[in-house]
Amino acid sequence: MLAEIIKETKQFAENTGLHKKKILLMFSGGKDSSLALYIMKKAGLDVSAITFFHKWSWRETLLWGMRFTEKLRVEHYLIDITEGLLKNSIGKKGPICIHCKKVMMRNAYWFAKINGFKVLAKGDNANDKIIGALLDQWKGDIRLSEIPRIGIPVFRPLIKYTAEEVEKLAKEAGIKPYRMYEYGRRRQWREGCPLQYIDKFEIIKQEYFNLAYEVNYEISKLARKYKVRMSVRVPSLKLMCHGCNEKILREADEIIRRFKNAAAWKNKK
């Protein structure tokens, strides 16, 4: 199936002129964007990757992504958006991912324009209809949309395939992204960064950023140990777990209790 998709992507690129254009893929290092990059590279497209990170990003996944693009011999740009994220989110109501995506898209647009990229690419799959609602208004093939508000065409090579199909294709390609064993935000296992676990309707504070990173980093160690999925919401410190038993929950509670005690001590001071 993978070979057919690569062949189809190559033919689609030739039919639409994509094969003559510089393409910039928004690359998180997750399964979807890694597979999208793999397919485009194998199809012979002129594709580069751009990864946005901030002070609280998982370093483990960033390093995995760098090794992956190096193996594919793909040019890979790393952009620190810490300052922009703080400026555009502190004091606003969550979820924080809405604010972060705006910062990333704005940076991607200007980076593409300045460096001669004619098309942006994303790893959206068929389960990402909310994210791709505007892109889906294009009357042509939804893989290539020319009407997004950012003002540059967007190519989504995986948009016709479900999350389950993408999982199978990634296995066929031998793609195994580094897992933090997060709980994830959706029905499918969608990892990201620890800031996504800031409680949805909280007014965003920078202190939540540090807490979200620290508590979830410790919980991820436990999750990886037992091969379950766990994350902690902040500032409520509510545990979310998929696959946990009583023993694992007790250990997780111990970790969370330390952070609660530290917060209580800080408030007393």
Image (cartoon, rainbow, N blue to C red):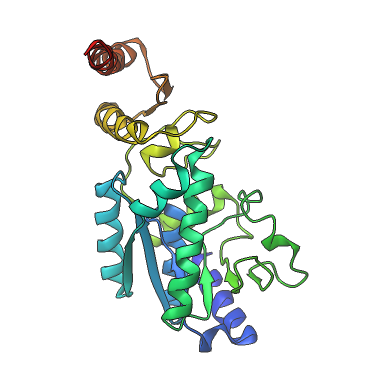
> Could you tell me residue 77's position as x and y percent?
32, 69
In the image: residue 232, left or right of residue 203: left
- The image quadrant of residue 254 is top left
In the image: residue 25, left or right of residue 76: right
Q: Is residue 242 something that shows in the picture?
A: no
In the image, farthest residue toward the right? 139
In the image: residue 92, left or right of residue 59: right
Q: Is residue 232 something that shows in the picture?
A: yes
> Could you tell me residue 28's position as x and y percent?
40, 56
Please report the residue visible at 32 percent of the width from the left and 51 percent of the height from the top.
Answer: 54
Quarter the N terminus occupies: bottom right
> Could you tell me residue 159's position as x and y percent?
61, 60
Quarter the C terminus occupies: top left
In the image: residue 165, left or right of residue 77: right
Please report the residue visible at 31 percent of the width from the left and 29 percent of the height from the top.
Answer: 211
> Could you tell me residue 48's position as x and y percent?
39, 74
Please report the residue visible at 59 percent of the width from the left and 82 percent of the height from the top.
Answer: 11
In the image, farthest residue toward the bottom? 20
Please report the residue visible at 27 percent of the width from the left and 12 percent of the height from the top.
Answer: 264
- The image quadrant of residue 145 is bottom right
- The image quadrant of residue 212 is top left
